[in-house]
Image (spheres, rainbow, N blue to C red):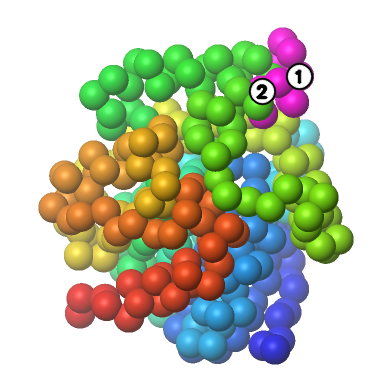
Amino acid sequence: MTAKTVNKLAVPGATLHYEVTGSGPVLLLIAGGYADCGVFDGIVGQLAAEYTVVSYDPRGSSRSPYDGAPVDERVDRAAGDALTLLDEVAGDEPAYVFGSGTGAIAGLELITRQPDRVRMLVAHEPPCVEVLPDAETSRAYFEDVHATCAADGVETAQRLYEIGTGLDEDDLPAPEDLRPEFREVMARMDANAEVYFTHKLLPFTRYQPDLLALERVAHKIVPAAGVDAAAHLPAQPISVIADYLGWPVVSFPGGHGGYASHPVQFATLLARVLEAEIS
């Protein structure tokens, strides 16, 4: 088994928990929503055979605490965290980046601001609904989730969120069928939900990507979505972005969380995508 090192990195306003596994070119994995880097545990070992795999808990999630009280997040701050981490582990070498959900939004902002630091970005279902023709409907839905958390509590908001985004259809094992260490990971991530709904959901879903800037680096961007998620909200914006960039959407196994439900197949396809970079 490839050894993993666990580290801490101070960033303005928070301290990031990050993990490094394997050797080779750096591959940064950015979790989304209220997940932390544990969501990628199933794919890290396979990818670490060819890459230095770096994953981290986004600020305010799990083991990456804020220095003080939670604050409403900004996408540029999330991209800055990713860049600071790349500076730490990759120096000035460009890195591969895989981001899912709001992690993909952080990746889009990172490649927009610092295109020379990204070798390839695989943007998996970024929920930046402002690019959709019916953005008002999706915007109102996320505002409803945010308001529901404040009025009725995090569990009710979580159920509304999972139904509206198709996460309730992801082919994941029931909690009672998970091994104890994975049950611990799931419980840890569920504990992040209130901060996510209160401080992160609206700033990220209202993000408007700079499509002209992305077009200039289109050769470095791989639009991606779960094959079972195409009809659901998180997968819709990447189709619009892909059409703008002139690329097809690469269909990964499973739904939005295919890296957790189908880890071997997901990691195999991701490795093939990374190997196919255009130089």
Instruction: Tell me the quarter of the picture where residue 69 sits.
Output: top right
Indicate yes or no whether the magenta region holds residue 152.
yes
From this view, report whether residue 132 is shown above or below residue 116: above
Percent x, y of residue 114: 35, 60
Q: How many labels does the image show?
A: 2
Q: Tag 1: residue type?
A: Gly
Report the residue at 26% width, 43% height from top: 239
- Secondary element at tag 1: loop
Q: Mark 1 points at which residue?
A: 153
Left or right of 8, for residue 31: left
Q: Mark 2 points at which residue?
A: 157
- In this view, the residue in front, 230 or 276, is 230
Instruction: Tell me the quarter of the picture where residue 94 sits.
Output: bottom left
> Which segment is the magenta one?
150-158
Percent x, y of residue 13: 68, 46
Left or right of 231, for residue 168: right
Q: Tag 2: residue type?
A: Ala
Residue 188 is marked as none
Query: Local crowd at mark 1 within 10 Å, few (<14), some, or many (≥20)?
Result: few
- In this view, the residue in front, 218 or 48, is 48
Report the residue at 24% width, 24% height from top: 133
Percent x, y of residue 201: 55, 31
